[in-house]
Amino acid sequence: MPKSPRPRARFPFSSTVRALLLAVAASGAALPALAAIEHEDVDRLMQAGKLDEAMAKADAFLKDKPRDPQMRFLKGVIQLDTGKRAEAIAAFTQLTQDAPELPEPYNNLAVIYASQNQFDKARGALESAIRTNPSYATAQENLGDVYARLASQAYSKALQLDQNNTAVQPKLAVIRTLFTPTPPGAKPTALVASAAPERPAPAAKAPPAPVPAPAPTPAPAPAAKVAAAPAPVAAPAKAPEAAPTPAPAPAAAPASTAEIESVVRGWASAWAGQDMERYLAAYGPDFVPGGGQSRKAWEEDRRARIVGKSSISVNIENLVIKVDGQNATAKFRQIYRADSLNISSRKTLDLQRSGNQWHIRKESVGG
């Protein structure tokens, strides 16, 4: 079991403070401009490593506004970053009671519990986060890693009780590969699960290290080019019959991959530009959000988490597109940056053509 590293102010498990502020605002809580400035000031001091100053400023603010959830959350992160885990647990636990609509405090509690190998408690906290917000992808991934840790413990116990059980060894070996260090030179992902409290755990989150497997875009890239190649071949073929007819025919085959790439990059551009009308229009009428959330609730949640950030960038790398008639799949590595948050994750978009337009009908992370 990897050892727990020194906690950091910006947990890979937790979403940004900005996301927390937006979530609170979306719930109807008041967010005065002056208070928002105070929150930003404390956050900047934390990022600069000036934790004593940040704590002093947070305490001064909370003297007048002791129930402010944003500042209490920030104070909890500072406590965690300075090794005061008991105080941080108390702060986040109290927040789950006073602001139960926020998933972030539950998630950070899970980080602490996982770093202490209390995986049952981590699981409970993450399940609460997901009940609060079923589309909270970070908590979903963290829960998967916690289950993997629990499975590892159970298989190890089974092996201790029956060393002749040959079925357990391979299962245990597979589970352990999920938490092996990232090979030198490999690019770790920003999100980490139960290994995440261990900040070296971007390494512990080795599964994404295999991402170079899907990422060997060199292999898929040719595939995309092959799809484009038929265009010129098809064009000359039909050109003799009628100049006008060949033009549409070649465009259909190659355009399919080109269209998909254009849709995907347009979707990312709308997201980065906080253009919610264009962003939401990228999703088809048959798109069903995860976690049983209604389309309306999902759209409101997306607006709350996107609009208002000072800056967003969504970069797409290693894009691999497969087209099958009226359906297509786009797999890529998404590099998401918003304010001080930087997350790298694998994403899959399933698209479907409706008339002349392609729309997203399913969205999944980690595939």
Image (cartoon, rainbow, N blue to C red):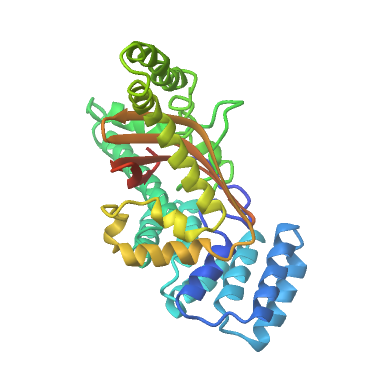
Q: Is residue 298 above or below residue 75?
A: above
Q: Is residue 364 above or below residue 277?
A: above
- At x 54% / y 82%, what residue is drawn? 30
Location of residue 67 (image quadrant): bottom right
Q: Which residue occupies the foreground of this view, 41 or 313?
A: 313
Which of the two residues, 342 or 322, is positioned nearer the viewer here? 322
Q: In the displayed image of the protein, which residue is found farthest to the bottom?
A: 64
State whether residue 192 appears in this view.
no
Horizontal and vertical percent for residue 232?
42, 15
**In the rendered image, which quarter is residue 91 located in?**
bottom right
From the top left corner, tell me how far across and down residue 256 is, in percent.
37, 30
Q: Is residue 315 left or right of residue 277?
A: right
* Along the line of sight, the residue nearer the viewer: 311 or 174: 311
Q: For the C terminus, which image quadrant?
A: top left
Q: Would residue 90 be visible to someone looking at this image?
A: yes
Q: Which residue corresponds to the image point at 63% horizontal and 51% vertical from the top-left? A: 6
Q: How many marks?
A: 0
| Residue 19 placement, left or right of 41 | left
Residue 219 placed where, x, y %? 45, 18
The correct choice, above or below, for 234 with respect to 253 in the image is above
Location of residue 224 with respect to 290 vertically, above or below = above
Instruction: Return the x and y of residue 46 as percentages of the image width and height.
Output: 70, 62
